[in-house]
Amino acid sequence: MDEPNLVVLGHNLQQLRQAKGISLSQLASDAGIAKSNLSRLENGSGNPTLDTIWRLAVQLDVSFGSLIDSINSPIEDDGMLVQLIERGTDAPQVDAYWMSCAPHTNKLSKAHSLGTFETISVISGQIETGEEENTKLLGAGDIHRFPADKPHLYRTTTAGATLLVTINYANKEHTHERK
C-alpha cells in the first residue's frame, strides 16, 4: 500500500477506535498485534496484511470497508488484490469488492464477524473457495455464498481468477440476540 493510502487507513482506524472509546493498547491486544505496529498503522506507515485489517475491523465491530474507505487503489497481499467498489448504507450492511487472485494463490482467511456471509461471483478464471472444510470449485459465471464467520479458503491453480465479492454483515440486532 502506498503512503497516501496508508495515511487514509491510519486516519480511518484512529477515528473508529477513538469513537468506540478503545485504547491503542486494548485494540492491539484484542487484535493480536503489537501496540507499536498498531501505532505505526494509525500514523500512516507500516505494511498491513489483509488479515491484519480484517482482525482490526472485527475487534472494532465495523465493516472491512469502513477501514479502507477512500483508498483509491487495490490492497495487495500474497497474490491477492482487493479494492472496495461500494459500501452499503442499509441494514444489514452489504459491501462490494473487486478481487484478483494470482495463479497458485492459497489463502486461508480467518473468521470474520459473527453472522457475516460472502458471495463470490467469478468473472474470469477458476477458484476453489468456501468454508475451509466445504469448498467449491468455481469458474466464470459461477456464484457461491458461504458463511464467512468461519475460516474460509481462496485457492487458484495455474490460472488466476477475477471475482466480484459481496460481504453481507449481520444485522446488529439479530447478532446480539444470537449470542
Image: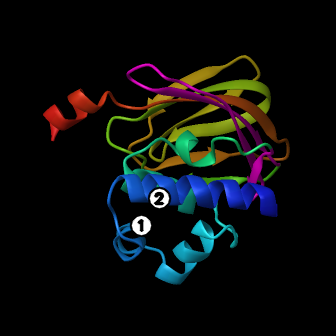
Q: Is residue 106 magenta?
A: no
Q: Secondary structure at mark 1?
A: helix
Q: Name the residue nearer the viewer: 11 or 166.
A: 11
Could you tell me the amino acid type at mark 1? Ala
Q: Name the residue nearer the viewer: 141 or 81.
A: 81
Side of 60 relative to 126 (left or right): left
Relative vertical location of residue 158 with respect to residue 28 in this rendering, above or below: above
Mark 2 neighbour class, 10 Å CA radius: few under 14, some 14 to 19, many 20 or more = many
Can residue 77 be seen at all in this image of the molecule? no
Which numbered marker is on residue 125? none
> Where, by quadrant of the figure, is residue 9 drawn?
bottom right
Could you say where residue 4 lies in the image, as x and y percent from the top left? 79, 57
Marks 1 and 2 close (CB-CB < 8 Å):
yes
Could you say where residue 14 lies in the image, as x and y percent from the top left? 51, 60
* Residue at 85% from the left image edge and 41% from the top image edge: 159
Q: Main secondary structure of the magenta part?
A: strand
In 3D space, how far apart are the residues under numbered discs 1 and 2 (Cα atoms)?
A: 6 Å
Q: Quadrant of the C terminus?
A: top left
* Residue at 72% from the left image edge and 45% from the top image edge: 71
Relative vertical location of residue 99 with respect to residue 93 in this rendering, above or below: below
Could you say where residue 64 lies in the image, as x and y percent from the top left? 53, 44
Label 2 sits on residue: 56
Can residue 79 be seen at all in this image of the molecule? yes
* Residue at 37% from the left image edge and 45% from the top image edge: 113
Write the start and end of the magenta stretch as one range. 73-102
Q: Secondary structure at mark 2?
A: helix
> Where, by quadrant of the figure, is residue 175 drawn?
top left
